[in-house]
Image: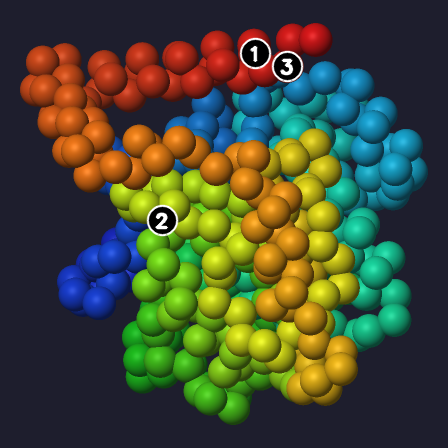
């Protein structure tokens, strides 16, 4: 795809999306940092280089160790991991490690391990024709479903992420037929016909979508925890409406995060009662995050999601922040302090300092 054309589509989608009042809450505090990034053709080609555009969307870092790689291959196999790593450094990451004809980093290895769990639990027995990933970042996880099972992918995310995922997936799968915002804008409606005849559909939230479209497998990994509760509710309404009768939902999110002045907890996500739990456990190598795989069911003796959410609450309590973190007075003070620092030092220097401290923290975390 022509890079300039992708930038044009992004600009159009961004203008359209953020002009609508009901979309203003979609951009959480986590995403406000993207207002300072330049979405140019050059930056798109290099979107993973030093985190130019992708910072906050993936876990790539320069503290990767082969100890972690060995842990992953001991759980799966080296052949499995190598077969699922890419031979192309899309986005020109400067911390990807070339190894045995492929590139790897922490972010991809985590995705491969998640995929291995799902493949062994579900995909060997159930044919998944389509997947809808909500908040899928630049498409790294969805890539594994296309590569291994030729699955139709529907990505819903903010325009900034959609630009990167379109570029990333098109570089890896140029033969696939893409449906993007410029296609949607023709009728401002995603029809069942358009859904069926395309391989990769990438749209911002709150688009008009045909109620006839049904999804086999919904996925959200580490992004609902960045949203406020009203947005999470709207996505759950969407999942409940568009799931097939025995559809799947993979939910991997923090036990608690405070993105909007109050705690967002996975144990309080608004599941209806019609889900049975297939896997529920702390996520590998990230025990502050929970891995929850469920399947739609309307048989009362098989549904157990509400009981399991209570269990998750008990597991997650040790990760809950002190109440001061979402105390109104503390939040006002924190907001005033940030404003004063911005006025005194400027936004760019503060971002630079913050990124530097973040890198130091990553290094300290990996010291044994």
Work out whether 123 lies above or below 363.
Answer: below
Q: CA distance from mark 1 to mark 3?
A: 5 Å
- Mark 3 or 2: the one toward you: 3
Q: Position of residue 225 (x, y in %)?
A: 45, 48
Q: Is residue 2 visible?
A: no
Q: Give the secondary structure at mark 1.
A: helix
Q: Nearer the viewer, residue 8 or 290?
A: 290
At a point 70% along the width and 76% down the height, the residue shown is 303
At a point 75% along the width and 51% down the height, the residue shown is 115
Work out whether 155 lies above or below 191.
Answer: above
Q: CA distance from mark 1 to mark 2?
A: 28 Å
**Residue where numbered disc 3 is placed:** 366
Work out whether 265 lies above or below 229.
Answer: above
Q: CA distance from mark 3 to mark 2?
A: 30 Å
Mark found first going from the N terminus, 1 or 2: 2
Rendered-image quadrant of the C terminus: top right
Q: Give the secondary structure at mark 3.
A: loop
Q: Residues within 10 Å of mark 3 (few under 14, many from 20)?
A: few
Q: Give residue 31's quadrant in the image.
A: top left
At a point 83% along the width and 43% down the height, the residue shown is 83
**Residue where numbered disc 2 is placed:** 160
Task: State if disc 3 and disc 1 touch (CB < 8 Å).
Answer: yes
Q: Position of residue 276 (x, y in %)?
A: 71, 72
**Residue 363, numbered label:** 1
Q: Give the secondary structure at mark 2.
A: helix
Q: Nearer the viewer, residue 77 or 169?
A: 77
């Amino acid at each position: 795809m022509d890079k300039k054309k992708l930038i044009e589509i992004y600009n159009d989608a961004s203008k359209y999306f953020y002009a609508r009042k009901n979309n203003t809450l979609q951009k959480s505090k986590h995403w406000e940092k993207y207002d300072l990034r330049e979405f140019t053709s050059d930056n798109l080609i290099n979107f993973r280089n030093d985190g130019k555009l992708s910072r906050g969307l993936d876990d790539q870092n320069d503290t990767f160790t082969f100890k972690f790689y060995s842990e992953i291959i001991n759980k799966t196999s080296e052949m499995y991991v190598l077969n699922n790593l890419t031979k192309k450094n899309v986005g020109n990451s400067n911390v990807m490690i070339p190894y045995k004809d492929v590139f790897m980093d922490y972010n991809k290895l985590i995705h491969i391990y998640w995929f291995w769990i799902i493949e062994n639990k579900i995909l060997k027995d159930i044919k998944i024709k389509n997947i809808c990933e909500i908040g899928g970042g630049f498409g790294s996880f969805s890539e594994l479903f296309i590569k291994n099972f030729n699955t139709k992918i529907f990505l819903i995310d903010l325009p900034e992420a959609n630009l990167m995922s379109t570029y990333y997936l098109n570089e890896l799968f140029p033969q696939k037929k893409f449906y993007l915002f410029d296609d949607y804008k023709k009728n401002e409606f995603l029809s069942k016909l358009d859904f069926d005849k395309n391989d990769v559909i990438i749209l911002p939230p709150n688009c008009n979508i045909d109620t006839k479209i049904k999804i086999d497998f919904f996925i959200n990994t580490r992004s609902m925890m960045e949203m406020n509760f009203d947005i999470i509710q709207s996505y759950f309404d969407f999942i409940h409406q568009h799931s097939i009768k025995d559809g799947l939902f993979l939910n991997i999110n923090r036990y608690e995060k405070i993105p909007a002045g109050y705690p967002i907890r996975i144990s309080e996500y608004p599941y209806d009662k019609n889900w049975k739990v297939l896997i529920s456990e702390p996520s590998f190598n990230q025990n502050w995050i929970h891995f929850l795989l469920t399947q739609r069911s309307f048989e009362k003796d098989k549904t157990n999601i509400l009981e399991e959410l209570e269990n998750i609450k008990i597991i997650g309590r040790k990760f809950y922040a002190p109440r001061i973190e979402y105390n109104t007075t503390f939040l006002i003070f924190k907001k005033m302090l940030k404003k004063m620092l911005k006025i005194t030092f400027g936004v760019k220097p503060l971002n630079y300092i913050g990124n530097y401290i973040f890198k130091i923290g990553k290094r300290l975390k990996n010291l044994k």
